[in-house]
Image (cartoon, coloured by chain):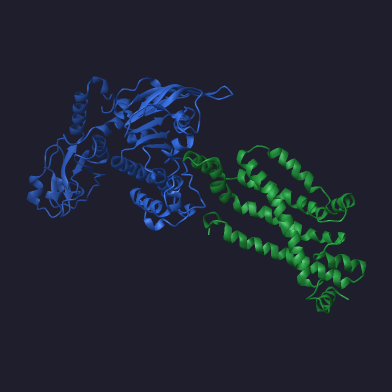
């Protein structure tokens, strides 16, 4: 059977679109895990990136940290933490957050550093306090780049959140893990297609977010 | 009044940007800081709004040390214009202008009304209010920069090479606009430039700084041109400082002759009657009296085919300076300058010799130190 055959078999299966193991439920779980992980990563990475970018200090330490974090194997971390802490949401969240922090942190830092120094000079010279310079000048101007960092973090989380299923949680990974253990390739293919579709939807979401949040003066149209 | 009192700025690496500089900057006038790069002019300006803190000395604003006030309150009381305008790209023109009023707590509609008023004041079409900076030309951006600095009506305006990034024609427009605004508002303007012509055009007082941040001379521009303090100032003013000095002398006393001017439909007798011995040419005007060009009087009177020689450019009598008159004479192929009234009608002509005499006369009234050597042979 070919790929399309598997896919058709998966999506046509009875009960696929409802119930606890139905696509809507699994999709919702997957989105929930991803959103929580992304939110935590943003809470950690954005303030640090904004502050180090604004002051210009700590850039080197930051890139070392980011490179190190990138080298962490998500699956290995999940297994290790589950052994140490037992089953739970924390061993799932830690690797996902660790995945998204480096791109958000590094791009935010770089984005703020890349803001034209003349703008900051003008803002300070007009008597804007430091926090207003950051919030009202540097952040809005750096926003497209910052969003791109969050976007790449989000895509990585969405693609990797399948690992939650290995430690008995839900999400789209359920289909892949179950499909492999049941030797049900239609399930594996279906799960993979859904994850890929969700990643594309995430891209679309950030494209729309960019339209809404970034000033036309910065987007230049 | 801003008093810069023995101010020094030394950086940790040992370089001295400003060296015991003392200047009194008078109220309601334009004071220009000019000098070559590395003379500390920008550093001096930035010490006035505490963007840079001096290593020694003090700066007084109306008798009070500027360090007595909270730094952001001090900055909000001083308009600040920088080289590339530094407009916020994410904000519209009107939002940019309203920055400081909003910071001071004005409500949106009042800040907006003030913004529109300022756009008109700086010569911007209010239709541009909702545009973003990237949609404006360099000159328009700089006008927005000036409007933004004036928004909260600060008594002091600090301008750091505001016009040096735009082309010469736009720059001239911006300079004229600044002088017009200053005539209306009477701000205490401190203006930094490396362009001596700009300094002379704009400054009521000009401080010439030299490398290492030392003051070379502090004087009104006419005095600077007539009596440079030393060789450095003389070099900095350039070789044609004598010619430039002429821009401070008006043409109102210049003796004109209205004789060699004829209308284009003049008869042979009229042309003959208007020919004077000093020149073989007569100036031909159109029916409204505006100059068209010079023509050879005898040939025209004899009915020979003649062509019009260009007259270069005319100067407006009583309004333009002797520099403009001299320039007009030098550019004219006949050696005579054409004077027009405010409506552009030719009212007389003046020979180079007459202008030279007027220059000598002008110098005689301001004393021997002001003599311009070697301007005219």
**A193 relative to B60 in the view: left or right:** right
For residue B61, above or below residue B109: above
- Say which of B172 and B66 sits in front: B66
For residue A6, above or below residue B247: below
For residue B72, above or below residue A184: above
Q: Residue at x 72, y 55 (%)?
A: A38
- Tell me the quarter of the picture where residue B174 sits: top left
Report whether residue B239 is seen.
Answer: no
Q: Residue at x 19, y 53 (%)?
A: B305
Write down which chain is painted blue: B
Q: Residue at x 36, y 29 (%)?
A: B62
Identify the image quadrant of the N terminus of chain B: top left
Q: Residue at x 22, y 21 (%)?
A: B367
Q: Position of residue B100 (x, y in %)?
A: 44, 45
- Say which of B265 and A178 sits in front: A178
Q: Position of residue B258 (x, y in %)?
A: 12, 42
For residue A12, above or below residue A103: below
- Say which of A70 and A126 sits in front: A126
């Amino acid at each position: 059977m070919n790929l399309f055959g598997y896919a058709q078999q998966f999506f046509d299966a009875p009960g696929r679109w409802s119930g606890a193991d139905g696509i809507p439920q699994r999709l919702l779980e997957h989105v929930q895990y991803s959103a929580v992980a992304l939110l935590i990563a943003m809470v950690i990475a954005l303030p640090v990136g904004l502050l180090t970018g604004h002051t210009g200090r700590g850039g080197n330490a930051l890139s070392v940290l980011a490179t190190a974090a990138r080298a962490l194997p998500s699956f290995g971390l999940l297994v290790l933490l589950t052994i140490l802490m037992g089953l739970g949401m924390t061993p799932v969240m830690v690797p996902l957050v660790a995945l998204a922090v480096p791109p958000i942190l590094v791009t935010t830092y770089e984005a703020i550093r890349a803001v034209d120094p003349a703008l900051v000079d003008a803002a300070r010279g007009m008597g804007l306090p430091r926090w207003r310079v950051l919030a009202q000048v540097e952040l809005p101007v750096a926003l497209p780049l910052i969003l791109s960092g969050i976007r790449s973090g989000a895509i990585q989380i969405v693609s990797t959140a399948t690992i939650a299923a290995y430690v008995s949680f839900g999400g789209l990974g359920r289909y892949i893990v179950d499909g492999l253990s049941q030797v049900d390739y239609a399930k594996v293919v279906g799960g993979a297609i859904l994850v890929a579709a969700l990643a594309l939807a995430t891209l679309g979401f950030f494209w729309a977010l960019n339209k809404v949040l970034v000033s036309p003066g910065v987007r230049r149209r | 009044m801003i008093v810069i009192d023995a101010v020094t700025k030394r950086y940790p690496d040992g370089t001295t940007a400003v060296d015991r500089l003392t200047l009194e900057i008078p109220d309601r006038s334009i004071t220009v800081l000019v000098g070559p790069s590395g003379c500390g002019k920008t550093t001096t300006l930035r010490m006035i709004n505490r963007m840079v803190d001096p290593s020694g000395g003090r700066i007084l604003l109306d008798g009070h040390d500027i360090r007595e006030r909270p730094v952001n309150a001090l900055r909000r009381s001083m308009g600040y214009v920088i080289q590339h305008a530094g407009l916020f790209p994410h904000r519209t023109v009107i939002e940019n202008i309203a920055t400081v009023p909003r910071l001071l707590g004005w409500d949106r509609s009042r800040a907006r009304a003030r913004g529109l008023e300022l756009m008109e004041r700086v010569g911007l079409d209010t239709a541009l209010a909702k545009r973003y900076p990237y949609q404006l030309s360099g000159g328009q951006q700089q006008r927005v920069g000036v409007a933004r600095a004036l928004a909260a009506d600060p008594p002091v305006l600090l301008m750091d090479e505001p016009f040096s990034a735009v082309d010469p024609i736009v720059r001239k427009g911006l300079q004229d606009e600044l002088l017009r605004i200053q005539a209306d508002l009477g701000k205490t303007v401190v203006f930094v430039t490396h362009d001596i012509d700009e300094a002379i055009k704009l400054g009521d007082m000009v401080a010439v700084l030299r490398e290492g941040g030392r003051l070379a001379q502090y004087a009104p521009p006419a005095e600077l041109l007539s009596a440079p303090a030393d060789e450095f100032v003389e070099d900095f003013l350039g070789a044609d400082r004598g010619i430039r000095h002429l821009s401070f002398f008006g043409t109102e006393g210049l003796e004109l002759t209205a004789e060699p001017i004829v209308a284009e439909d003049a008869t042979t007798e009229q042309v003959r009657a208007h020919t004077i011995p000093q020149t073989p040419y007569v100036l031909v005007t159109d029916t409204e009296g505006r100059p068209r060009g010079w023509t050879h009087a005898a040939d025209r009177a004899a009915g020979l085919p003649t062509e019009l020689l260009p007259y270069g450019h005319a100067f407006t009598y009583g309004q333009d300076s002797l520099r403009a008159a001299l320039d007009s004479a030098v550019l004219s192929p006949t050696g005579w300058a054409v004077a027009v009234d405010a409506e552009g009608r030719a009212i007389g002509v003046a020979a180079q010799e007459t202008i030279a005499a007027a220059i000598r006369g002008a110098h005689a009234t301001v004393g021997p130190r002001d003599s311009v050597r070697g301007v005219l042979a």
